[in-house]
Amino acid sequence: MKTNLLKFVIISMMAAIMITGCNKDKDKEETGCDCNEELYYYKNGQKVFIGDLFLNNSLLVAFTSEYEKEMEDYLYLDKWIESYLNGSGIFEPLDWTRGRIIAITGNDVAYIELWLITKVPKTCSQMKNIIHWLENEQLVAYASFTFKNLLTYYPYFFVEVNDLSDLYALMQETNVKVLRNEGNRFTILADKNSKGNALQMANYFYETGKFASVSLEFLN
């Protein structure tokens, strides 16, 4: 089950983006606090809410090159991505310098991760609808919220296993994948085909109480 070590090559860093949290009731509609209770993670056994760090005009979207050979209408994947996003009417014109990461995972699938800026601020619920729309596209591997300071979370999380049968049962239930393992510590990938994103799945695994530890890394 052990696979190649995850490698991340940072091509360029994210440019400045508007930073707007959601910590005032009167700003609920504008800032996205309508799903504040869903935005949390666990640290040292405590639930940490991050709704006040939610960015209401930014998303991280990952495209996969897996289907590039099937795209006869476009010479390069980059050109297709630019046409797809700019033609949506949702985002500001794509600027590759805003951030691009190529993630080479243990199953040798390359992801192109881009920070996208929406033309107007969106609520959390509206952002979830945009994510759903994006993830219906075959070439999109996953999409996620971004947060002030934390920026966003990686598409994987870490599980320290007590009983392998518990891990296998939850993998089957949630459709997550093992990228690699070192002893009883597993790196788990959650993509658009999983029951939830990496943040949601890390919380779900933690809340079962079946694992020695569950942790999530943030990209900052």
Image (spheres, grey):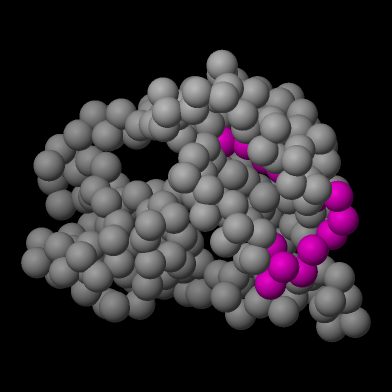
Residue at position x 70%, y 32% in the image: 83
Q: As rendered, which of 30 and 217 lies closer to the eye?
A: 30
Q: Position of residue 110 (x, y in %)?
A: 41, 29
Q: Residue at x 63, y 65 (%)?
A: 128
Instruction: Name the side, left or right, on which 209 lies relative to 25.
Output: left
Which residue is farthest right? Answer: 26
Q: Indicate whether residue 129 is drawn in magenta.
A: no
Quadrant including the N terminus: top left
Residue 142 percent coordinates (x, y): 50, 49
Is any atom of residue 139 visible in this view? yes
Nearer-the-camera pick, 158 or 71: 71
- Please say whether residue 117 is one of the residues in the magenta stretch: yes
Tally of marks: 0
Q: Residue furthest bottom?
A: 25
Q: Look at the image and give the residue range highlighted in magenta.
A: 113-127
Q: Position of residue 80 (x, y in %)?
A: 61, 29
Q: Residue at x 28, y 61 (%)?
A: 175
On the image, which quarter does residue 14 sit in? Answer: top right
Residue 82 vertical position relative to residue 145 in the rendered view, above or below: above
